[in-house]
Amino acid sequence: MQNLTAHHGMGKSLASAKCAAIKATHEAEAAAVAAQAAAAVARMAAAKAALMDEFVTKATTQRGEGKAMASYLVFRHGSNGANQPMTERMALGWFDGHTGEEACELARRQGETVYGNQRLTYKLASRCTKAEKREGDASTAWREDDIPSGGGLGAATRPHASSGGCGPATTPAAR
């Protein structure tokens, strides 16, 4: 009997040691899994921050922030008896902006009328032909001469209509 008890006692201590080893192994594995999960969460947070930075950069670039000002020649397309009879495309002049859309908006704010059957387009100055540059210079000179006077049929006295879109000019030279 004593042999059996002694043997049985050794079995308990051996089983207890095995349980302790298994428990330590499981705890180490759990700690490793927790470390991996923490690293994954940190990677996801870094990726989210990078995506947010990219989103903010794209949004500010689309609004023109961070870009240098440029000169654009703004055109009005669409014949209308009120402002450009029998003329499908007319240069309105040179407008500075961070983007072409901003240049078109500036043209509208300065009183250039755009009726429902008309739209504005823009062309970067460096992409304009010599003829377009001359047309833009003439339109700008006419507009600048007319605005201070406050009389006549110039931009300062024209009614403002905000319809019509704005996009890049689609002439063959712009492509």
Image (cartoon, rainbow, N blue to C red):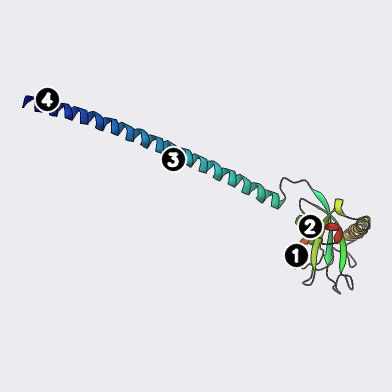
Question: How far from the left and from the top, in percent, is residue 164?
Answer: 76, 67
In this rendering, which labeled residue sits more in front, label 3 or label 4?
4
Depth order, front residue of 114/36: 36
Dot 2 or dot 4, earlier in sequence: 4
Residue found at the far bottom of this picture: 81
Dot 3 or dot 1, earlier in sequence: 3
Question: How far from the left and from the top, in percent, is residue 48?
Answer: 55, 45
In the rendered image of this protein, does residue 161 appear above or below residue 55?
below
SS under mark 3: helix
Q: Which residue is label 4 attached to?
A: 6
Are circles 3 and 2 on residues that touch, CB within 8 Å?
no
Q: Amino acid at mark 4?
A: Ala
Q: Which residue is label 1 attached to?
A: 165
CA gap, disc 3 and disc 4 = 46 Å
CA gap, disc 2 and disc 1 = 13 Å
The quarter of the rendered structure image containing the C terminus is bottom right
The mark found on residue 106 in the picture is: 2
